[in-house]
Image (cartoon, grey):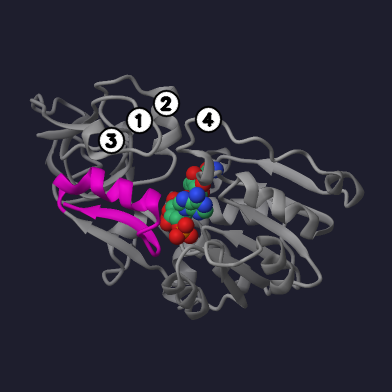
């Protein structure tokens, strides 16, 4: 069995030499345990900030995967069934059945199981909870989302359309803007090529934004505040523009706009609504099978390429969810 470890803590942007591939010897599964083989592995932005706080050098990289049961001593998880497991960047793993989450029952034949790491998994749930639970989004409102062509952002915008909103997205390449148009976003702009972020935000929604799904943080966040409408809601999902900073950015500061427009800003982790996951995943799956929700993936082949896939995702190589196919 193989595992990718954190050879040394990242300094600034992660580089290939920060990772090390190691061999692990696994025990035979005991009663109540199974042996898993990774099929798809997820690379996600949170791994970068979590590595600093929750990992020691030499630890196996954290992460979720879709795995196949190849040996079983647990009646609920027979050989051949698929599960999601948070066992990290590992090719194989022995664990108790109690730690596993079976993929949704009745998973359609024509839907790739990798979506359990994307649209029908944690990123899809994040999009849904951020909009419904945090923003309390309503029909007819104007929604802004950044990192809009990514795993979470692309679902945010599409749910916004399902709910009858005007949706503005922002991403870092023109190919991504074209993709956002395909998904039904009303307007999209490239934050890297606009001359003024303030002007681009204003032009995309002259009457301002009711809801802002925040994935990027930093200066982007500062630029959006003045464009929020009265009683606007900001769901703070992530701040990827700051994850690789070696020196903290100055600002953004709390604006007077927060006061005078009576804005609500709330950070959240998708795990807060775990008790709703099964019902929410079913809802996401039915939107997908009805064709209301599209999913795109950026698939890297080979377990050997985990670090490259992770670094590529942080750089913005991905349209849709970045996954690795073993
Ligand atoms: P994505 O699939 O969106 O991939 C990351 C994207 O971020 C890149 O493709 C890139 O696209 C963009 N990006 C990278 N650097 C910058 C930068 N400096 N400024 C602006 N954009 C940048 O990842 P996810 O959808 O998985 O995650 C999106 C956000 O959601 C992250 O902040 C993540 O931490 C957060 N998150 C939070 C969760 C929660 O529970 N709160 C759960 C899951 C994710 P581009 O070309 O547009 O720059």
Crowd class of label 3 (few under 14; some 14 to 19; many from 20; radius 10 Å) = many
Q: Is residue 207 above or below residue 219?
A: below
**Label 2: which residue?**
52
Q: Nearer the viewer, mark 4 or mark 3?
A: 4
> Residue 229 falls in which quadrant of the image?
bottom right
Residue hosting label 3: 88
Do we see residue 125 in this rendering?
Answer: no
Q: Which residue is mark 1?
A: 10
Give the crowd class for mark 1: few <14, some 14-19, many >=20 residues within 10 Å.
Answer: some
Check disc 4 and report its element: helix, strand or loop: loop
Would you say the residues marked 2 and 1 are in contact, meaning their CB atoms lie under 8 Å apart?
yes
Q: Residues within 10 Å of mark 2 (few under 14, many from 20)?
A: few
Residue 299: x and y in percent read 26, 60
Q: Position of residue 121 (x, y in %)?
A: 42, 53
Under circle 1, the secondary element is loop
In the image, what residue occupies the spot 34% across and 56% down? 322
Query: Camera-side residue: 124 or 8?
Result: 8
Please state which of the two labelled residues, at mark 1 or mark 3, is closer to the viewer.
1
Q: Point out the stretch of residues depicted in magenta.
A: 302-326
Name the residue beneath numbered marker 4. 247
The answer to whether residue 158 is magenta is no
């Amino acid at each position: 069995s193989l595992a990718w470890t954190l050879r040394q803590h990242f300094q600034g942007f992660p580089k290939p030499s920060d990772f090390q591939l190691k061999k692990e010897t696994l025990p035979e599964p005991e009663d109540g345990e199974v042996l898993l083989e990774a099929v798809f592995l997820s690379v996600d932005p949170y791994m970068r900030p979590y590595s600093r706080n929750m990992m020691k050098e030499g630890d196996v990289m954290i992460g979720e995967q879709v795995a196949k049961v190849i040996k079983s001593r647990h009646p609920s998880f027979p050989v051949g069934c698929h599960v999601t497991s948070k066992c990290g960047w590992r090719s194989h793993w022995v664990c108790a059945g109690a730690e596993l989450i079976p993929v949704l029952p009745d998973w359609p034949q024509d839907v790739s199981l990798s979506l359990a790491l994307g649209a029908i998994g944690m990123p899809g749930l994040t999009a849904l909870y951020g909009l419904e639970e945090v923003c309390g989004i309503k029909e007819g409102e104007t929604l802004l989302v950044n990192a809009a062509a990514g795993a979470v952002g692309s679902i945010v915008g599409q749910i916004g359309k399902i709910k009858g909103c005007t949706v503005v997205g922002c991403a870092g390449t023109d190919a991504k803007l074209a993709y956002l148009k395909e998904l039904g976003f009303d307007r999209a702009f490239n934050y890297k090529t606009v001359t003024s972020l303030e002007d681009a935000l204003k032009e995309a929604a002259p009457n301002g934004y009711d809801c802002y799904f925040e994935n990027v943080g930093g200066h982007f966040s500062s630029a959006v505040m003045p464009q929020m409408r009265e009683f606007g809601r900001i769901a703070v999902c992530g701040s990827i523009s700051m994850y690789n900073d070696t020196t903290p950015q100055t600002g953004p500061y709390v604006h007077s706009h927060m006061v005078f427009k009576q804005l609500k800003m709330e950070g959240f982790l998708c795990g807060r609504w775990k008790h709703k996951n099964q019902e929410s995943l079913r809802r996401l799956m039915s939107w997908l099978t009805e064709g209301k929700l599209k999913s795109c993936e950026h698939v890297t082949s080979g377990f050997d390429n985990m670090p490259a896939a992770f670094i590529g995702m942080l750089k913005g190589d991905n349209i849709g969810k970045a996954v690795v196919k073993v």
